[in-house]
Amino acid sequence: MLTIGPGPDPYFAYKIHHVERAKTAWILSEEFGLYEALRDGPTTIAQVSQRIGLQNRPTAVLLAANACLGILGTEDDRYYIYDVMREMVLEGGRARTVPKTPDPEKDWWYRIMKQALRTNVPVPEALPDWLTNPQGNEDTTAFAPSRHGWRILWGQALAEAVDFSPFRTVADLGGATGGVLVGLTERYPHLQGIVVDLPYSQKTAEAAVRQSKAQERVRFHAADFFSDPFPAGIDVFFMSHVIHDWDAEHCVQLLRRCHQALPVGSPVLVQEYLLNEDKTAGLIAVFQWFGLMYGTIGDQRTGPEIEALMVESGFSETECRPLDHEQGIVIGWKR
C-alpha cells in the first residue's frame, strides 16, 4: 500500500474534486439499501448484490467507497458496518444521519451515477468525447493546460522511478497531450517519445509539445491502439490511466499487442492510482473507480491484479513500484 506522509501534496485539488463523489456514494448507498443489507453482519459482495438488486461491479464500488469513508470494515472478503457507525447509518440508530436526496433534474452527477450503478453500463449522455468523437474537430481542445502540466510532473517522477538509459524509443499509449513524455525526455534527452492516441487529441497535443519546447524529442502518432499498427522501433510501452478504462478482456488484448511489438528485454509500464489489497484505499483510487462507472467498462485495480493481466498477456518478472505517494508503476518484461 502506498502511504501518505507530511509535506506538499500535488493532489490536493483532485482530492477536493472527490468530495462530491464521496457525497454521492453516501446518498446512493442509502437509496439502494446498502446499509440495511449489511445489518446482520459480515456479508460478501455477491450477497449484498443480491439483496440490493445491483450487479457485482457497482456493488463492489459502493462497498469500497463506504470502506474508504470509514463506515465499513472488511474481513475475509466480507464487509461489515463498524459498531459505532451502526448508530449512524442503520434505521433506528441513536445518531442516525440521513443525507438529503438531490433533485435529479438539477444534480447531473447524482442522476448519472444512479443510472450507471443501476444498469452497470456507461451512460450514453456521459460518455467522454474521445469515445463519441474520436476524430475530433477543427476547434477541438482535448485537455486543459493544467492536465498537461500534471503529466509533465508525472513524467519527471517516472524518470526517477525507472532507469530509461538502456532504451531509445518510448510510446505513450493514450498519451493525451504528451506531458509524460515531455517530463521524461527532459531527464533522458536521448529518448524519443511517441504519443499514440486518437486523432481527437492530435491538435492539442502538438500545440502543447511545441509550447513545452520538446518537439525535437516528442511526436504524435494518430492511431487506435486496439487495432491500428504501432510505430516501428518502440522498445518501451507506457500507459498512464488507460488500463482502468477497460475490462480484463480488453486489457489483455492491448497488453498482448504490446508484447508482440516489443523486442526481447523490453518492458511495458502501467501507471495507475492503485487500490490497496482489500480495495478500501487510497481515496483517489477508490473514488476514481466510483467515477469510472458512468463512462467506461473498466475498473480501478490493485497492483497484483495488473501484474496478473500482464502475465496472462505474455509478460514476466512483473513488479510494482511507487511513483509518488498516490500512484504506482506496474512493470512487466518481455523475456
Image: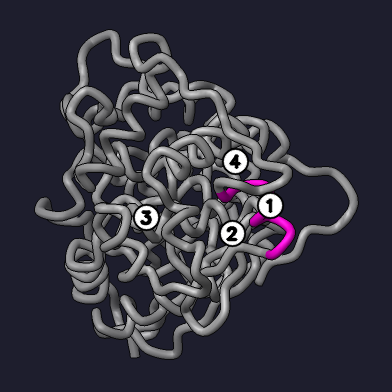
Amino acid of disc 3: His
Q: Estimate the spatial distance between the alpha carbons at disc 2 and disc 4, rounded to whole Å.
A: 32 Å
Q: Is residue 236 left or right of residue 42?
A: left
Relative vertical location of residue 215 with respect to residue 85 in this rendering, above or below: above
N-term mark: 4 or 1: 1
Q: Which residue is mark 2?
A: 67
Q: Nearer the viewer, residue 179 or 275?
A: 275
The residue at the point 54 percent across, 22 percent down is 145
N-term mark: 3 or 4: 4
Q: What kind of secondary structure does the magenta stretch mostly adopt?
A: helix
Q: Which residue is mark 3?
A: 244
Would you say residue 149 is visible in this rendering? no
Q: Estimate the spatial distance between the alpha carbons at disc 1 and disc 3, rounded to whole Å.
A: 36 Å
- Look at the numbered disc 2 and give the secondary structure of its residue: helix
State the image quarter where residue 151 is shown: top right
Please say if the residues under marks 1 and 3 sit with CB atoms less than 8 Å apart. Answer: no
Q: Estimate the spatial distance between the alpha carbons at disc 3 and disc 4, rounded to whole Å.
A: 20 Å
Q: Please state the extent of the stretch shown in magenta in the rendering.
A: 83-90
Residue 88 is covered by the magenta coloring: yes
N-term mark: 1 or 3: 1
Q: Can you tell which mark lies on residue 87?
A: 1
Q: Estimate the spatial distance between the alpha carbons at disc 2 and disc 1, rounded to whole Å.
A: 16 Å
Amino acid of disc 4: Ile
Q: Residue furthest front?
A: 92
- Residue 215 x %, y %: 46, 34
- Look at the numbered disc 3 and give the secondary structure of its residue: helix
Would you say residue 92 is visible in this rendering? yes
Amino acid of disc 1: Glu
The residue at the point 43 percent across, 21 percent down is 207
Amino acid of disc 2: Ala
Q: Which residue is mark 4?
A: 152
